[in-house]
Amino acid sequence: MPTTSLSSKGQIIIPKPIRAQHNWHPGQKFQVIDTANGLILKEATPFAEATLDQVAACLPSHGKAKTLAEMEEAIRLGAKEAAGDRG
């Protein structure tokens, strides 16, 4: 298991094999999560978390909204078409 040291500036070097495995490069941003068992480094996302409603609200909508029955029928037809593509 690779080890590292804490510098006088509070910096820790992540060993090169681990950086390569995760494709981490200089400037990579991380969230640092403190747990009872130690720290977790999690890649920071470039965007703030959003709910499905927030994302869907920004999508353009054209025409009349589909009914649940219309959506279920479209799903049924799509599944039937996909099954036909397999064989």
Image (cartoon, helix red, strand yellow):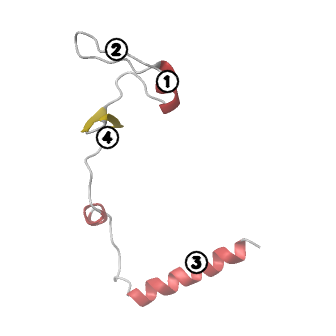
What amino acid is found at the position of numbered circle 2 in the picture? Ser
In the image as oriented, which residue stretches furthest toward the top?
A: 8
In the image as oriented, which residue stretches furthest toward the left?
A: 9
Classify mark 2: helix, strand or loop. Answer: loop
**Mark 4 or 1: the one toward you:** 1
Residue 41 location (% of width, % of height): 34, 34
Q: Earlier in the sequence, mark 3 or mark 4?
A: 4
In 3D space, how far apart are the residues under numbered discs 3 and 4 (Cα atoms)? 34 Å
Where residue 5 is drawn, which disc sits there? 2
Q: Are marks 2 and 4 in contact (CB under 8 Å)?
A: no
Q: Earlier in the sequence, mark 4 or mark 1?
A: 1
What amino acid is found at the position of numbered circle 4 in the picture? Pro
Residues 11 and 34: in front is: 34
In 3D space, how far apart are the residues under numbered discs 2 and 4 (Cα atoms)? 28 Å
The residue under label 4 is: 46
The correct choice, above or below, for 49 with respect to 19 in the image is below
Classify mark 4: helix, strand or loop. Answer: loop
Classify mark 3: helix, strand or loop. Answer: helix
Where residue 1 is drawn, which disc sits there? 1
Classify mark 1: helix, strand or loop. Answer: loop
Q: Residue at x 48, y 19 (%)?
A: 16
Image check: 31 left or right of 70? left
The residue under label 3 is: 78
The correct choice, above or below, for 13 with respect to 72 in the image is above
**Mark 1 or 3: the one toward you:** 1
